[in-house]
Amino acid sequence: MKLLKQISILLILLVTSITYAQVKFEAKVSKQKLGVNERLRIDFEMNQDGDNFNPPDFSNFNVVGGPNQSVSNSWINGVRSFKKTYSYFLAPKGRGHFTIAQATINIGGETYKTVPITIEVTAAVEIPKDPNDPNYIASENIHLVAEISKTNPYLNEAITVVYKLYVSPTIAVDNWNEIDSPRYNDFWSQNIDTQGQKVQNGTFKGEDYRFLVLRKTVLYPQKTGKLNIEPLSLDIALRVPTNRRDIFGSLLMTRTNKVVSAGNSTITVKPLPEEGKPLDFSGAVGDFSFEVSPSKTSLEASESLQLKVAVKGNGNLKLFKLPKVSLPSSLEVYEPEHKEEVNTSLSGMQGSISDNYTIVPQYKGKYPIPSISFSYFDLKTESYKRLTSDEIVLDVLSGPLNTANSNSTSVANNGKQPVLLNKDQFAFIKTSTNFVSINNTAFFKTTAFWSLLLLPFLAIPLAIVIRNKKATRDADVYGNKIRKADKLARKYLSNAKKSLGKKEAFYIALEKALHNYLKAKLHIETYELSKDRINTLLAEKQVEATVVKDFISILESCELARYTPIDIVTMQEDYEKAATTISLIDKQAR
């Protein structure tokens, strides 16, 4: 009977050991079906500590919170229970069925993966209104609005979109981050500089608000019909009042994050009328003037002149082509130089565009440049207009006569005439010379010669010394391990400095730097990094209590930063405090 009892106890211990040794790594979601205006929480849980956690690519979601890390470690009836969790808060980008891919982690030298999870995102759902909920208070007191100047423009007519953020005086905005920018696929777009904008007072739906102009964009529709203007979305960190008061009677504020969007807008673009459309119409829409002007009208043969074709005014100046110049064949014409002097404001494009032709006459005579016409659609009268230049006559005063037409005053015909060139215009380019250097200097037995000859022999002792030091260093396995961990700590601390301003990336890098520093300094592993253990080991190395307290407080800051909004000033302070504390531990530890 006693033997049977011992066997039973042994089996229970064996089963308990096997159960505990089994590694679990799984993903859990708060819900598998949600509205597009709701948020999803996903937790990646493991029952043993691991390294190199890699979350999946949340390509169909915006990460609005996380990663938040929590660790639970307890002993119940002699059995150890451990749980570590990475949590993310996600906002869907749109409706549909989406799959959250596998996450991976390395535990005990093995790689473990979670099971993919399918999430259904439906249309927006009704969210219960709780007047004490910070998210509800934020949604009622902050609004992002897109003001569109015209919803039924003509094709290529300028419209403006002004994005304004309205904030109630009862809440405070700490920071915002643009998480989704509109893509104007069917428009030519130009953003107007809004830097230096100041907060203004105004009204929204009859109530007093403060507002800030975030973005101004000028759009020229390039298609007709119904076109969609995508929304601008912001993730805003703000403070909202609670129903609690301090000892002075003032309302206490709580921090929260709110994603706001300007919402989709649709405009209807009208096509330009077909009635009265000129055959040479190239798409110009606006109010323009047209000018064709030569730099001179009297010149010699083989002398050049500039012919400028320019359009000035307001409209889609960058979106159409200038009319081409038709010239007599006896005039040599080069490809025009295109020039744009256009400024874009809320009223659209303003300025001028021009083509500058270089013309070189070859023969004596008079050459007419025919009139050129330019047509455009006038938005004020909603009709087409045509502008025509005057005929220009070029008078070539001297030069060879055109052999195809002996009358020097006649107009050049349409046949292409040969160009007569002077045989002495270009001389033959010689490809070889007979030049001989005046001073010949021998390299043999010079200072440079002896230096290069002896340099390899002088380098041999240096190479032997370096090789011996390297062999000694390679043999120091324990020292190499410490140096590697210390180098990794400096690397993560460097990464933390580069990530200043990005809360999650900064505090993850800072925490890894601190952990790797302790592993190098105290010769402990990751699973031993508890606050009590750190406190005890640093005290044994005679590190001052205040320094140990500062080090522990930095680790706590890394944990708390995942749950609270942090500005860049606080991040800079934590970074400097970490660097100073590591330096003090190096000086004091024995």
Image: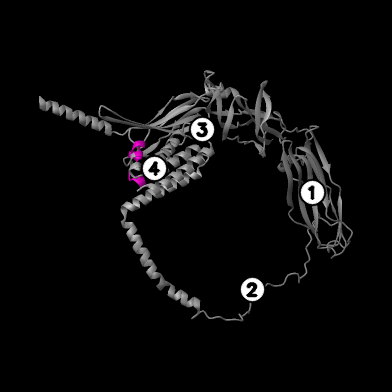
Disc 4 to disc 2, how far (Cα)? 81 Å
Q: Position of residue 135 (x, y in %)?
A: 53, 24
Residue 420, compared with residue 197, is above or below; it is: below
Q: Can residue 100 be seen from the camera position used here? A: yes
**Residue wearing tag 2:** 431
Helix or strand or loop: what does disc 4 sit on? loop
Report the side of 134 relative to 166 (left or right).
Answer: left
What's the CA distance linking mark 3 and mark 2?
73 Å
Residue 478 versus residue 7: which sits nearer the camera?
A: 478
**Sequence-wise first label, 4 or 1:** 1
Q: Are marks 3 and 2 in contact (CB under 8 Å)?
A: no
Please tell me which of labels 1 and 2 falls first in the chain: 1
- Mark 3 lies on a secondary structure that is loop
Inspect the image, locate mark 3, and give the three-letter code of the amino acid beneath it: Pro
Q: Amino acid at mark 1?
A: Val
Residue 397, by quadrant, is bottom right
Instruction: Inspect the image, locate mark 2, and give the three-letter code of the amino acid beneath it.
Output: Thr
Q: Which mark is drawn over residue 309? A: 1
Secondary structure beneath dot 2 equals loop
The answer to which quarter of the image holds residue 161 is top right
Q: Please give the residue where the numbered disc 3 appears in the rendered image.
A: 565
Question: Which segment did they paint magenta?
Answer: 519-535
- Report the Cα–Cα distance between label 4 and label 1: 81 Å
